[in-house]
Image (cartoon, helix red, strand yellow):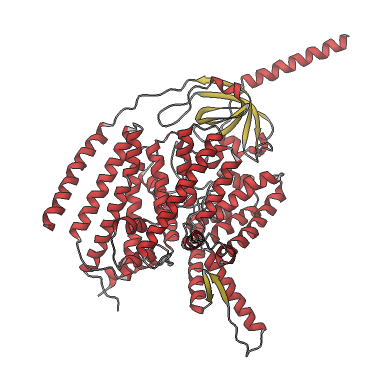
Amino acid sequence: MKIKKVVSCQLSVVSVLFLLSIAYAQPISSTDLINNAKEYDGKIVVYAGEVIGDIMVRGENAWINVNDNKSAIGIWAAKELTKTITNTGSYKSKGDRVEITGVFHRACLEHGGDLDMHAQTIRKIGFGGIPQEIISVRKRNLVFLLLGLLCLALILKQSKSK
Amino acid sequence: MIIRPNIADIKIIGYYLGKIILGLGFTMLVPIAMGFALGEINPTLDFLISIELSLILGLLLIKLCYTEKDLSWMEGMIVVSLSWLVAMVLGAIPLYLSGHWNSYLDACFDAMSGFATTGLALVQDLDHISFAHNLWRHLIMFIGGQGIVIVALAFFVKGISGAFKMYVGEARDERVLPNVIHTARFIWLVSVVYLILGTTALGIVGSLNGMKPFNAFFHGACIFMAAFDTGGFAPQSQNILYYHSLPFEIVTITIMILGAINFKLHYYIWMGNRREILKNIETVTLFITIMITFFITAFGLTQIGTYPKAMMMFRKGFYQLISGHTGTGYMTIYARQFINDWNHLALVGVICAMALGGAVCSTTGAIKMLRVGIIFKALLEDIKRIILSERAIVVQKFHHIKEVFLEDKQARSALIITLAYLVLYSLGAIMGMLFGYPFLDSLFESTSAAANVGLSCGITTVTMPAALKLTYIFQMWAGRLEFMSIFTLIGFFVAVFKGK
């Protein structure tokens, strides 16, 4: 009984330490993951970045692509995990920033050899949104200036050909 | 004695260049409409500035160089080679104004890569680029794939006898129809029909894959334009890997192969002569070279065991191979994976595939299947001459739309162009090595640029030296035009300075 108690206590400590190590682990960059894919293959890693493009739901799961300003990496996650994501990055919007903990695959057996991550947890670490587009006054003025020059060029062409 | 070109020669070049610039300017109306419809104000302004500059330049050239003379062969070739440079300079303006390119040189690099249907890219933060700019990136591939001059011939030229000279200058020495302008229009008809079909197929697959319908069809149109024109740009930074979809990859493979087929063959298939596919020297050679290069690549990949399953080999090994062979450059792996996860043998397989290319009179670059087939037939003829008795008359035939007797002239022409391509591939590789890149990486990237493929092993980045960027721009330009118009342009400048 005593031995059992000690073992279960040790296991609990190890589990807590493992969870803590994941919770406070520094995210690995996409460059690091791609360049050292062999070392990380099959291991649990933490990766963070902005969700870009579409959330592509496939049955009970979904694909999201997360960009850390260097490259984007495909994340395969349970549909439920992606529900917290409200904004995805595009020209008009900034995507939510998320931190993913999951298993990294250099060439995923399930997904035809894709370099991807299978998410265990997805934590939102920053909100995206739709920033106001500021019109460039310099560009607008240049459009009008060139329009004038274009009219002059047209007049020049028409007048001489007559 | 070299004769110095006179002012009349320069005027005629300027006049037709002006017409082509006008044609190019009008194509910017498409991204303007897109930007306007989606309320992308700054991108619309970028294109308004660019279209105005193009129209001003085009109008001034037409006015100042007005002539009623028709083009000579030399002038036709020079117009073509200059048109591509001017298209690069003007096409890069909206890209640079968007702020997604670090320098104007980078924007020019992507513009040339687009027009030449290469697919190497230096764009930054692609995942946040506007729809208008993304459409332009793919539209220039569509325009470049058909040929910039073809656009002008098809839509802006009513009928000039010099049209054929410009048509040939754009590396298309075969006419589908007797009239070159009808040929140009037929090429556009084929492309537009496939555009509708391809966009619909990709749009449906994208929607079923969970993309929003608008995004699915927009991506579908962009991917089709770049795949059919064997370009290789994609709307997202991960290229085709973004979609994580086998059906999407199968559809793109089909489109890439369609793009690599001779337009003349498309015409015969459309006319109901489907047996031509099985007999034509180009399709037969394409099939054989795909098999050989895939065997090399697959053998290499099996040695290191990166992709242990057949499906993985298909989606990674075969996909990159077919993408390279057709000159498209679509990727389902990251650039550095070529170096980190593939061995030398697998890379050699892909390099050979890239160097060979697709059919003549298609949208691909590189040596091309007809030339490979002719060289092989010529070699066969020579071997027969050695083996058979001296009195035997050796005749070699090949089937290309009709039965053709192989002549020395055809073999010589095929060998000269092949040699020119090999020199071009080597030139870029040497330049890469001069900047400290390893041999195989340099050869890979150089072949990709010169054969207008677009697969990258990671050399093409914003941080690469400017001289290497210029080298690749030159390779993309020379490779796309197949040298003759470039040689003519060089000869023209020599005549300007050294002629009497």
Q: Residue furthest front?
A: B272
**Is residue B12 among the parts visible in the rendering?**
yes
Q: Residue furthest bottom?
A: B391
Q: Is residue B104 above or below residue B271?
A: above
Q: Answer left or right for B258 relative to B484.
A: right
Pinpoint residue B121: horizontal percent, then vertical percent: 46, 45
* Quadrant of image for the N terminus of chain B: bottom left
Q: Residue at x 24, y 60 (%)?
A: B15
Q: Answer left or right for B151 relative to B414.
A: left
Q: Residue at x 52, y 28 (%)?
A: A49
Front residue of this view, candidates B473 and A39: B473
Please tell me in which quadrant of the rendered image residue B76 appears.
bottom left
Q: Answer left or right for B432 relative to B339.
A: left
Q: Is residue B77 above or below residue B234?
A: below
Front residue of this view, candidates B374 and A101: B374
Pinpoint residue A11: horizontal percent, then vertical percent: 78, 16
Q: Residue at x 17, y 42 (%)?
A: A148
Pinpoint residue B230: horizontal percent, then vertical percent: 49, 52
Front residue of this view, candidates A56 and B43: A56
Please tell me in which quadrant of the rendered image residue B41 appears.
top left
* Quadrant of image for the C terminus of chain B: bottom left
Pinpoint residue A26: horizontal percent, then vertical percent: 59, 25
**Is residue B225 among the parts visible in the rendering?**
no
Please tell me in which quadrant of the rendered image residue B186 appears.
bottom left
Q: Is residue B379 above or below residue B142?
A: below
Q: How many marks can you see?
A: 0
